[in-house]
Image (cartoon, grey):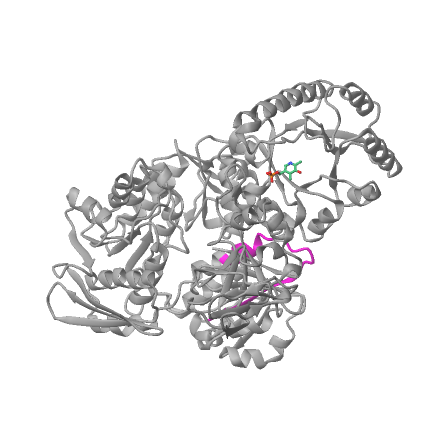
Amino acid sequence: MTYSIEKVTTLIGARRYGDQAANIGFLLTDSRSLCFPEETLFFALKSGRRNGHEFIPDLYRRGVRNFVVDALPQDYATTYPGSNFLKVISPLEALQRLAERHRDEFNIPVVGVTGSNGKTIVKEWLYQLLSPSLSVTRSPRSYNSQIGVPLSVWLLGEQSQVGVFEAGISQPGEMQALRNIIQPTIGVITNIGSAHQENFPSMEAKVDEKLDLFRDASVIVYPGDSKEIASRVGERSFKGDHLWWSVADANAPLYIKNVEKGETSTTVTYIYNKVGGECQYTLPFIDEASIENSITCCAVCLSLGISAADIAGRMPKLEAVAMRLEVKQGQHGCTLINDSYNSDINSLDIALDFISRRPDHKGRRRTLILSDILQSGMTRDQLYAEVSELCVKRGVEKFIGVGPDLMAEADRIGVGEKYFFPDSQTFIKSPVFSTLRDEVILIKGARAFGFDGISELLEQKVHETILEVNLQAVVDNLNYYRSYMKPETKLVCMVKANAYGSGAVEVAKTLQDHRVDYLAVAVADEGVTLRKNGITSNIMIMNPEMTAFKTMFDYDLEPEVYSFRLLDALVKAARREGITGYPVHIKLDTGMHRLGFNPKTDIDELIHRLQSQNAIIPRSVFSHFVGSDSDDFDNFSKMQFDLFDEASSKLQAAFPHKILRHICNSAGIEHFPERQLDMCRLGLGLYGIDSRDNHILNNVSTLKTTILQLRDVPKEETVGYSRKGHLTRDSRIAAIPIGYADGLNRHLGRGNCYCLVNGQKAPYVGNICMDVAMIDVTGIPCKEGDTVEIFGDHLPVTVLSDVLDTIPYEVLTSVSDRVKRVYYQD
Ligand SMILES: *Cc1c(COP(=O)(O)O)cnc(C)c1O
């Protein structure tokens, strides 16, 4: 569906400047995601430090002609001929208004899902359960925010027969906007937990805010056994039908009479509205969360008139919801991007966008391996025409289609190099498969096509021990720290020591995509690696070696300068190369007594030497806090700051150009936001650890391995070298392929620490070996091949650093290079 620009102007109540005719089909809020410029309407949003208005010149150059703004650009008519500017008070509200008016066009059932956990799973399962008989439009991935919801609802089109949208809130007052956009006819609350509790005065207040989504719904679905939810629903008068479910109360509209767990599946027996007697379905999961989510989905299906027989037929086919997009090393110089999220056109677009935003140094080909897209609700020719257009716009150079529909639509795919196969096996046996070389390959397939087999064969065989790195968590941490900073304050992100162990290249690509001002590494070689992998951001070298000046000039790496000896050598090297005005960063020692000029005694001489040459110029001046992570040192920090403030101001006063001043590291940003000056340097916080109290923000790295072998060892035997693991009971011992050579510190052994096996604590038994460790899994249900978490999402790295009497930095940076890093994005 498209809207004329006149119609959009009226719907959002804008003043229009420009009279170009246009039809709008795509809404854009992030300039990096542009795909169809002619039909795009760009909303220049202001959020935190980002001002969308800054991207108008770039978007205009790329063909966008329609903009929603709160201020007209200067000389808009001459600078941007042929454009329409729609001026409003708030572009965000205009976006929401437009989605609301779009929603008004549809008189169909719309399900709005909220709750603390399980929203995305319930939404995806509803899609799986409903799409055999209805054309479902749903939020892509977890687009559930103030911006994500309008973009999701905008996807409703002529084919839509039911909508399923997620609503997520983190602040009071947000739900009202989402309610107006989603206008749910069926409201669903999955459960309530502690997420974002800090922003709400009480649990009741948070439940109330969530329930606000349902104000005008005709049916509300909720777990009646949750006291927090049931009592708040009771307090408020909803006009809709209450479809609550309970395992305890036989009077519930959906009474769950029995839940029987088997080895791999669960059978749920229920009575709906006491009519029709007992019904049953079986789902292929046995964990509590899945069972509850299935019941919620069952309730929604019933209220949409899906028969108990259809529910029973569809539930066993439910698939686990994988939201991940994984980046892995492949064979033969390939990089694999494995997107296990349900195959549909919106998620294909998101995955292609992800790839096109990651620089590739070698200019490798971009290849897409795609299966037939099932249950799209579109006709086949329409669907594959859209797929083709997306691929062309997003720069796919080689297309491999798997499945009968794609075979039939082969002509429609407009990519230069293309191949088609009826199924995965035929593809795997073909020369097209065996000759994949030096390509960036996106693998995206509906589960029915068995794409796991393809990605397994293409992956480099890795040691079973991996470090999983969550790139989304890096971004969330970045935004958390930015929230303490003024929009104009610049930011250096520390990716030294291989990004605190998580892998500098992929983390730097993500940070560059989020437009940080500087990246910083310790030595020149680390900077060169980044440049060779396509990083174009500014890069600062914190410990420049005298032998590497030429390398730094060649690769545009900006050194820190901390002594006269270094300064003189650098000036000399720059002159030799005929370089002038090379940017450097001046370090002052205000109390660390490590490296740096003395702010009291050196500053005049420093100014003099800098002024009497033109080979280098000071781009910034900085110092480092000794103890910003502890209140105990607040007086010392103040002394450091004052010393720095005075000396750096003096330096600035001696030069006509702006010299950026910076002193705050992660803890400083949080603790002394008033000392942020022109720039801050974010390190540990980016990797999810708050060094002030060691709590985990968003966990980034998870070190994982698998059980190699299990054995029963009788009481009184010993385990491992030097007979240190003395067993005091009959025990079940698991061997895991990780040892001190992988970075698992030996002092964690002999019962000093534990890892997690299927969520339970398994202590290390005996001495940790070089490549293997033994753990006690007595009483823990597990089998060979099961995953073991060494630290990460469920076992904070700080537990290990506390046992080792060290800091988390050391544990993170100790994970050795032979442990493969696997990156993913939710
Ligand atoms: C490592 C480093 C940082 C980052 O410190 P965190 O405590 O990790 O935030 C900042 N500045 C300098 C000079 C550093 O060496």
Residue 236 visible at all: no
Residue 236 in picture, x, y percent from top left: 17, 42
Residue 353 highlighted magenta (yes or no): yes
Is 798 on the left-hand or right-hand side of 160?
Answer: right
Residue interval drawn in magenta: 351-371
Task: Please name whichever residue, 157 or 252, is drawn nearer the observer in this view of the structure.
Answer: 252
Above-or-below relation of 703 to 500? below
Q: Residue furthest right?
A: 576
Above-or-below relation of 660 to 419? above
Task: Please name whichever residue, 158 or 103, is drawn nearer the observer in this view of the structure.
Answer: 103
Above-or-below relation of 491 to 224? above
- Image mark count: 0
Measuring 62% from the left and 23% from the top, which residue is drawn there? 641
Residue 33 in picture, x, y percent from top left: 51, 50
Q: Quadrant of ligand 1?
A: top right
Measuring 63% from the left and 79% from the top, which residue is drawn there? 431
Measuring 67% from the left and 29% from the top, which residue is drawn there? 623
Q: Residue furthest front?
A: 716
Residue 136 highlighted magenta (yes or no): no
Is 315 on the left-hand or right-hand side of 22?
Answer: left
Task: Please name whichever residue, 686 or 242, is drawn nearer the observer in this view of the structure.
Answer: 686
Residue 52 visible at all: yes
Quadrant including the N terminus:
bottom left
Is 45 on the left-hand or right-hand side of 615?
Answer: left
Residue 540 in picture, x, y percent from top left: 70, 39
Residue 350 in picture, x, y percent from top left: 48, 56
Find residue 573 and report its image quarter: top right
